[in-house]
Amino acid sequence: MAVASAKPAPRAVARPQNVLIVGVGGQGVIMVSKVLASLCQLQGYDVKQSQVHGMAKRGGTVFSHVRYGERVYSPTIPEGEADVLVALEWAEGMRWLPYLEQKNGTVFVDTQQIVPPFACRNRHRGAVGGYVRETVADIMAHVPNSFALDALGIATALGVPKASNSVLLGAMSTALEFPPDDWKEIIERFVPPKTVQANLKCFDSGRDWALSFDRDGLLEKHAESAPLTVETPREKPDDLSHIDIEANWCKGCDICVRFCPERCLVMNDQQIAEVAYPERCTGCRICEWLCPDFAITVKTPGAVA
Ligand code: SF4
Ligand code: SF4
């Protein structure tokens, strides 16, 4: 008697499908990649996945290639052959664009910026940074199937900023063939039990956003937009960077205090970091980048969220 296979027969595809997921350490690139790879496997495809994250501390580059099809021989996606590029960080999205298949490739890019400290070229407030110059309008003009979304903003509005990768998963799901319920089943396996509902909500929101994407509206909104990085000198007090420190998340390690080049921060008598000299802050984001507990958010005036 024939035994029924647990795997469905995979859809016949002419060549492997290539999905490239990029971002920086701490954003959940690997989670997105694992969800996709598991889903492809569950659908009966041969899957190859490769990733680089070993050397990436928080803030370093992380990328993962996922290839699936009837038979896949190589784990890496050649330049110009990614069918889908998913970027959890703006500059990483721009950096990996050459990997996208130029005619029909689809890119989903979060407008979230994580500016590395080495982008800060001098210690004056308002200094020109070395971050990428491309705008939302640029990418939309350059790539026909481009989706620039504020995934972090969507997740934050839902009360779970750390689940912005699930927003990206939801958006990405619209470009791939798998049914939403299958995605959700896999997501449930990869997120902590307490956060399942929040992550599924984020997935739905990302999916809804992509399905109702108003390309013309977004283009109009960003037609005259300046580059994402702020260049104008900040002389007025209300132009200062704003540093939020989430006291409940701060473990008092004092890394931010020691590494802030301008000595803006101090430890208070509760052993929680606080801003003592906001006027000295250059907005370099070193404190945000180095905080192991994600307790610091630096808001730079004029930056696109
Ligand atoms: S680096 Fe983060 S956890 Fe450490 S003192 Fe600063 S805010 Fe607190
Ligand atoms: S407080 Fe943070 S953003 Fe401001 S100068 Fe210090 S390290 Fe840089």
Image: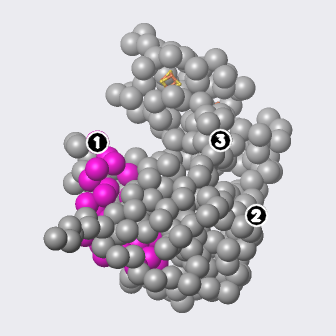
Q: Badge 3 is on which residue?
A: 60
Name the foreground residue: 71 vs 146: 71
Gap in angstroms between the C-alphas marked 2 and 1: 37 Å
Which residue corresponds to the image point at 52% horizontal and 41% vertical from the top-left? 26
- Please check the rendered image and state whether residue 246 is part of the magenta-colored stretch, yes or no: no
Image position, residue 96 (x, y; %): 70, 63
Which residue corresponds to the image point at 83% horizontal and 42% vertical from the top-left? 121
Q: Badge 2 is on which residue?
A: 133
Quarter of the view holding residue 140: bottom right
Which label belongs to residue 192? 1
Q: Locate the N terminus by quadrant.
A: bottom left
Which residue corresponds to the image point at 79% horizontal and 35% vertical from the top-left? 123
Horizontal side of residue 188 vs 235, given as left or right: left
Q: Is mark 3 within 8 Å of ligand 1?
A: no
Quarter of the view holding residue 45: bottom left
Amino acid type, callout 1: Pro
Circle 2: is it few (<14), some (14-19), or many (20+) Cα within 10 Å?
A: some
Gap in angstroms between the C-alphas marked 3 and 1: 24 Å
User: Secondary structure of the magenta portion, mostly?
Assistant: helix
